[in-house]
Image (cartoon, rainbow, N blue to C red):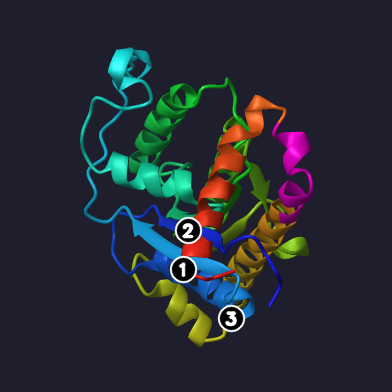
Amino acid sequence: MIPILRKIKILGICGSPRSNGNSQYLLDCGLQASEQKYGELIEVQQSSFKGKKILPCLSCFRCSEGDSVGECVIHDDFQNLRDLWIEADVIIYSMPVYHYGIPGQVKCFLDRLGNTLNRRFETTSPRLLKILGAIVQGSHFAAGQESAVTFLAQHAILKNCIPVSGDGWQSYLGACGWTLNSREKSALKDLVQNGNQDAQLAVAASRSLCTRAIELALIVHFGAKELRLFLGEEPVYKPYLDRLEQGTMAAIKEKVI
């Protein structure tokens, strides 16, 4: 086992409002491949938008005022997912294409996440250094998958995180797939079992995307370990170093290290 400070926390977010559908299938394929390769080094958790209520941002800016700094005044399922997002080292988004982009439910979450995080930390523009990967699928070919993946990569950069892709020509920006115009929840799984090359490539891209995300998180982890004193002089790295330290103390208590 590689001697790391603590386990790398992986959060898989299924952005589909449907349960056990094609987005969940690709996410499971990617995370299962990661667990098979890095099981002892990682801690995997999942969250789904199925049944979640996350309202749009009101642009009231109450999250920048008084005792509410960093907190949204709307109380729904946003807070729980936000906390999971903050704690994670690697975030893998998997979602369908809606109107040539990401689903509105996910956009509502990202809008509120952006506003509250901008005010949650003491320093401006903190380097969160999370590794973010995107898996996107839709019913049709070239129907917005790359637009959605690009948006999520821009979201990663905006939050001072690191976007990651999979391997080679299978995944230039992220993992993309299509269901050959089928709306069935099991469309991709059925296509894979029937030997459809496009569906098999979507699975391969999802697996390599998750694997590369963990590898990059380990590189960042070890880099921060070696440069901890140097980075500690820069306030923008404090949120990342605090997350690293908190996880290390928890690991010591559980005798993980």
In the picture of the structure, the residue carrying the numbered disc 2 is: 250
Q: Which is nearer the eye, 107 or 229?
A: 229
- Say whether marks 2 and 1 touch (CB < 8 Å): yes
Residue numbers of the magenta segment = 222-232
Q: Write the residue at 59% across / 24% down.
A: 125
Mark 1: which secondary structure?
loop
Residue 202: in magenta span? no
Q: Is residue 88 above or below residue 183?
A: above
Q: Is residue 80 above or below residue 2?
A: above
Residue 228: in magenta span? yes
In the picture of the structure, the residue carrying the numbered disc 3 is: 36
Residue 132 spot, x, y in % from top left: 59, 49
Task: Give me the C-alpha separation between circle 2 and circle 3.
Answer: 24 Å
Q: Earlier in the sequence, mark 1 or mark 3?
A: 3
- The quadrant holding residue 170 is bottom right
Q: Is residue 96 visible?
A: yes
Please state if 44 lies on the left or on the right of 240 as rendered. Answer: left
Which residue sits furthest bottom?
A: 194
- The quadrant holding residue 74 is top left
Mark 3: which secondary structure?
helix
Residue 164 spot, x, y in % from top left: 67, 52
Mark 2: which secondary structure?
helix
Q: What amino acid is found at the position of numbered circle 1 in the picture?
A: Glu
Mark 2 vs mark 3: give the one in front. 2
Which disc is residue 254 wearing? 1
Residue 78 spot, x, y in % from top left: 30, 40
How many marks are shown on the rendered structure?
Answer: 3
Task: Give me the C-alpha separation between circle 1 and circle 3.
Answer: 23 Å
Q: Is residue 179 visible?
A: no
